[in-house]
Image (cartoon, helix red, strand yellow):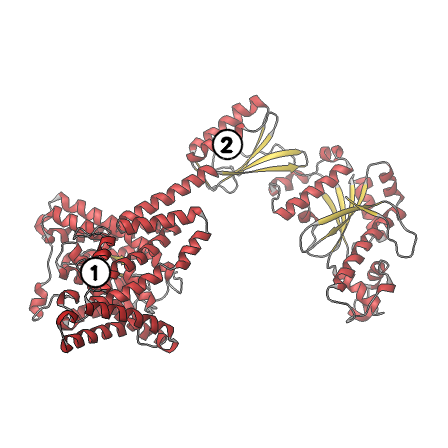
Amino acid sequence: MPATSTSSPPTFFKDLSAGLVVFLVALPLCLGVALASNAPLFAGIVAGIIGGIVVGVLSGSQTSVSGPAAGLTAIVAAQITKLGAFDVFLLAVMFAGVLQIILGVCRAGFIAAFFPSSVIKGLLAAIGVILILKQIPHVVGHDPDPEGDMGFEQPDHENTFTEIWSALFDIQPGAALVGVLSILLMVFWDKIKPLKNSVVPAPLVVVLFGVGVSMLLKQVGGGAWAIGASHLVQVPVAKDFSAFLGFLVFPNFSALGNPAVYGAAFTIAIVASLETMLNLEAVDKIDPQQRSSPPNRELIAQGIGNVTAGLIGGLPVTSVIVRSSVNINAGGKTKLSTFFHGILLLGCVLLVPGMLNQIPLAALGAILLMTGLKLASPALVKQMWTEGRNQFLPFIITVVAIVLTDLLVGIVIGLVVSISFILHSNMRRPLRKFMEQHITGDVLRIELANQVSFFSRVKLEETLRSVPKGGHVLLDARSTDYIDADILDLIHDFQHNTAKVHGIKLSLAGFKDKYPQIKDRIQFLNYSSREVQDSLTPERVLEIFKEGNERFREGTHLTRDIGRLVDATSAGQFPMAVVLSCIDSRTPAELVFDLSLGDVFSVRIAGNIARDKVLGSLEYSCAVAGAKMILVMGHTSCGAVNAAVDLICSNQTAAEATGCVNLDSLVSEIQKSVDLSTCKREGEWLPAEKAAYANEVSRRNVLRTMRKITERSSTLTGLVQQGKLVIVGAMYDIQTGMVSFFQTEGSSHSPLPIPMVKAI
């Protein structure tokens, strides 16, 4: 949700301060963009004013700043030349705004959600690199390239790198002094905490410092150290208000019948909207409060801004990443800063243009260079590197492409590269394969991706053809939202032709009613039915439990349709095992062994002890219901065992310690597995010694329960002797999720029964 635009007292002065800084930076940028676009200089100023006041008020973004965009300079220059006159071009700008309003009303801003994050971050880093490279010449007083030019190829037939080389041989001493000292001043300002947190922004101090040094150099000696007018801001100066109004240019409505106007309007609307959406996403990423700007509202705001610009002689406006990042770095919190920068542009250009023309470009270049260093931070590059090749390559290619071409061309290249990586990834991994070991046999589960396009056809066809004759394959589309018609045809053909010829069983899940030509069907049993129970041996049941625990630890659970299982097991139950476990909430057997409905009887009692009623349940489970295995499962950190140890070592009863009057009979059963000769009182245990001791008691308690089952139930003993039943012990580690299985080989007749055991 977009944040409120209300500027509270704590943020009010920060917004005013940030707006002042943005104004100082935006002023030469507006002029530079106009100059690079072959448009009247004042058209850039008008666009900056509209971007601040009109768009600033209507926008839902709290940090984005709009104005004439460097990314549009080539298009603007080309369209002005094509249409033959600037006033005809203004007509195209106006209609471009109307188109943007229509796009916003039609909610076309959804496209912003589809920009890859690697491209957005590449845009931010590239703008930072461009600011650094482009401002180096301005910092030393080499100013033939306009301040707002962001393209690699420049209007003066130089490029970004040759311009830096030329600057080495054209250093202006006075401007270079201002530029270098301004950088040092900003670095120093950020290092001193009271200065950094003060209401006075460092960029304002830099500008005032630059103006002061410039005036001092003129008065002291002039000559080579004096900063000439070509190295200062050059705002058009009007003698009076009438002359100011004379700077305005109005659209030529007589060109309404010119088809080229509408072609230009369409081009401007699409490119300006794309740049705005990209910049809006980028600005939201660097917003300290991580607010989300509404893209559709932004399109409408930009559209109204461009209609206004077309009517009064301004260049097209978009959200601009340079101004926006300056705003954020200067501490702007709400869109009051954007609005205030627009008011300052209007007021100062109207009232004090001469004072503005005293600001050295070197000082402004230093501010922008420091902004670039924050955008193109090594931390961002390191983060993208750690995210892997699929993120880093689109990111770095976007950066290089923008730096070596221009903003729009570089973005298009970055998008193409990013999409190609997405398509390549989809072609390589359109599906995931798992070999599942169900009760009735192995099933190859093919999990389809969320979006299965025709690019996935080759991989899916190869996988299906690799299924051996007589095999079983499950196509799992439960997490799939879209399946291309070509993929559906492939599945339909495999189901009705290939699978039948090769004797392959094909199960389908997740297709349901979305794809009428393919119906869900499961052709394997993943629960214990009568037929399954009869076919299982006790040894196979134990293996099923081991395999299930391994899946549980790895997080690769078997595919199950719970609704189908509820229906299938409603007619009767044929469990393959009975589990005697503790009531502990962390030890549910069905989860620990990745079991299904109807697979087991579960007997739960604190301390997993074998009382008479428990023995009765076990006998029924095996002799009547046909279970093939009794699993007695204890676990580490057992509360019942810990309590039993504490009570017997302190010579207390459960009733005395807890007030539970029925607990003693249960605790006393567990205490029969405690060796009193090794017992210690509370406070006498070494660190971790008590936990290890209690865990060993838990294990002995399991063994004692196993022996008690065979001693007290001739029914169960007889089943064991007939090979129809196996009694297995187990310890569940609550920290790792691993179950250790063991069986007894004999028993001791000592008061503390510790049968010989073997791990299995």
- Drawn side of residue 418 relative to residue 35, left or right: right
Q: Quadrant of the N terminus?
A: bottom left
SS for tag 1? loop
- Drawn side of residue 89 relative to residue 372, left or right: left
**Image coords of residue 110 (percent x, y):** 35, 50
Give the residue at mark 1. 147
Q: CA distance from mark 2 to mark 1?
A: 62 Å
Give the residue at mark 2. 518
Within-10-Å neighbours for mark 1: few <14, some 14–19, many 20+? many
Q: Is residue 544 visible?
A: yes
Q: Residue at x 55, y 25 (%)?
A: 499
Q: The disc labelled 2 sits on which kind of residue?
A: Ile
Camera-side mark, 2 or 1: 1
> In the drawing, what numbered circle is on residue 215?
none
User: 668 and 337: which one is in front?
Assistant: 337
**Image coords of residue 398 (percent x, y):** 34, 49
Q: Is residue 575 visible?
A: no
**Image coords of residue 120 (percent x, y):** 36, 53
Q: Residue at x 10, y 54 (%)?
A: 87
- Drawn side of residue 644 relative to residue 569, left or right: right
Quarter of image, res 667: bottom right
Quarter of image, res 337: bottom left
Q: Quadrant of the C terminus?
A: top right
Q: The disc labelled 1 sits on which kind of residue?
A: Glu
Q: Residue at x 51, y 37 (%)?
A: 511
**Image coords of residue 226 (percent x, y):** 15, 71
Tell which circle, 2 or 1, labels the residue nearer the N-terminal end. Answer: 1
User: 541 and 182: which one is in front?
Assistant: 182
